[in-house]
Image: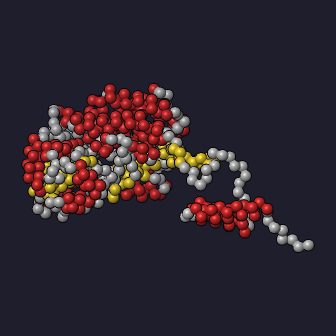
Amino acid sequence: MATTLRTVPPEPPLPPTVLPCSDPATGERFGEAAVMDRAAVVATVQRARAAQAAWAATSWAERRAVLSDILKYVVQHQEEICRLAVRDSGKTMVDAAMGEIFPVCEKLRYTIAHGEADLRAERRTSGFLPHKAARVEYLPLGVIGVIAPWNFPFHNFFCPVIPALFAGNAVVVKVSELATWSSLRYVEIFAEVLRRRGHSPDLVQIVTGYGETGSALVTSGVEKIFFTGSPQNGRKVMAAAAETLTPVVLELGGKDPMIICDDADLEQAVSTATFGVFNACGQMCVGAERLYVFAGIYDAFVREVVARAQALRQGPPLQGEVDVGAMTMPRQLEIVQELVDDAVAKGARVLCGGQPRTDLPGNYYPPTVLVDVDHSMRITREEQFGPVMVIVKVDSEAEAIRLANDCPYGLGSSVFTRDPARGERLARAIAAGMTTVNDFGLAYMIQSLPFGGLKISGFGRINGREGLRACCNEKAMVTDRIPVRQGMALYPVRPATLELVTGAVRAIYGAGIGKKARGALQIARSLLSLARGPKSTETT
């Protein structure tokens, strides 16, 4: 039977042009923001475009200096930044420090250290044209639009902006309506640093509102869109972007499998799985949403994770020391409960948790452990985005891989085993954009690696060299290595013209020295014929 969710009395209605900001952990409303219409979004993009022209001409050294100042600010103001994120998202201060501060600092460090090398012009072979020099230039696109989700307010804002800004672009971010209050402060960090270094604060701006505001950004004339969200909304973004042929990078969530082999270190697997499921109340695109545990270790694993889940403290993060905070979006509690109810109706058992908390003031779902799960249940295929550990017992590697890949998502994954060869074998077999052996989520923290997924998890990559270059026009450039002023006269076409072309093909691509030599001889005869000029057709 479905659980009836507790509702919080609604606040007084606001005008449709005003967006309310509230704390999901307490229900407290603490501010409002403007709902920006299309005209306001287009004006914001125009200001960004005007500022970008000067920024594109800056040196790598100056861009590094800007990012270095931002890094110093973040390090010096960690607590303030975390508190802002906690107020908007409901996560704990520890979750904010780990999931907001660490990735942003590492993204800044990587870009400062390696950004220039990743975007420096790259020489390429000129093939059969040795007199030409070939290279790829990584040039700014112009204005990049970002549509950010709500689960990590600081991280989801800063991490797309950093590579886009370093690549010479301006950036306009449509922040989530559920993370607007903190974003109004976060954008001032960029503004303060840019002003201090003599640059326009219009280089990084936010637009606020609901879906219509995001749609306006997609069709506003920006050169590229980076979207993070659900597959359903990703399809809408693609459809809107198709109207103007605006390219998109889509990160559309995951349903990450974690395979725990019978030779895994039990303590390591239990600790990592607990973190992977319950960190940020399960609201992570790379959260461990499906655990495939080998039969030989299953009972011991379940016993340990249940004990740990039951011991986790939950409550308002800023009112005391807790392990698990609130969920950000009220609707997400309903989604989680629908999936748990469906699983239970089909034979799964809830060992702890399983219903929303009615004794706390905000959006709380308790740490939950669900066993006897199989793939007839929606919770193995649909992203729950909540603190539910879904455990499936498996008997073999083949079964683990088959079930891990039996899912429409393909973002991240994990494998636990003491056998390095086994870990490599299983990791390669999982259909995902990333796999970590004997750990969880580290692919994102290693900023040299690309981040992205397969299937409905989206396409395109962020992070690393690939992420930086995704913010650029990858322009092919061909220049003279040895100037040849006399072009090859192919027009008007004469009988020897075709012989010249076919001879060149044989000389360059023919198999064996003999065929290449015959091609070279054909070229020589053709050139000699062309040099003599056309034969006269006049009669005397």
Q: How many marks?
A: 0
Q: Residue furthest front?
A: 514
Residue 368: x, y in percent?
Answer: 14, 49
In the image, 334 versus 158, the foreground residue is 158
Q: Residue at x 14, y 55 (%)?
A: 294
Is 137 left or right of 9, judged from the image as shown?
A: right
- The colour style of the image is secondary structure
- Residue 253: x percent and y percent? 30, 52
Which residue is at the far right?
540
Between 122 and 107, the residue placed more toward the observer is 122
Q: Give the percent coordinates (x, y) of residue 428.
A: 29, 55
Residue that sits furthest to the bottom in the current view: 539
Query: Which residue is painted at 18% across and 55% down in the image?
Result: 292
User: Relative to 169, is 238 above or below?
Assistant: below
Question: Is residue 344 shown left or right of residue 492?
Answer: left
Q: Residue 350: percent from the left, percent from the top?
A: 10, 54
Residue 398, above or below 538: above
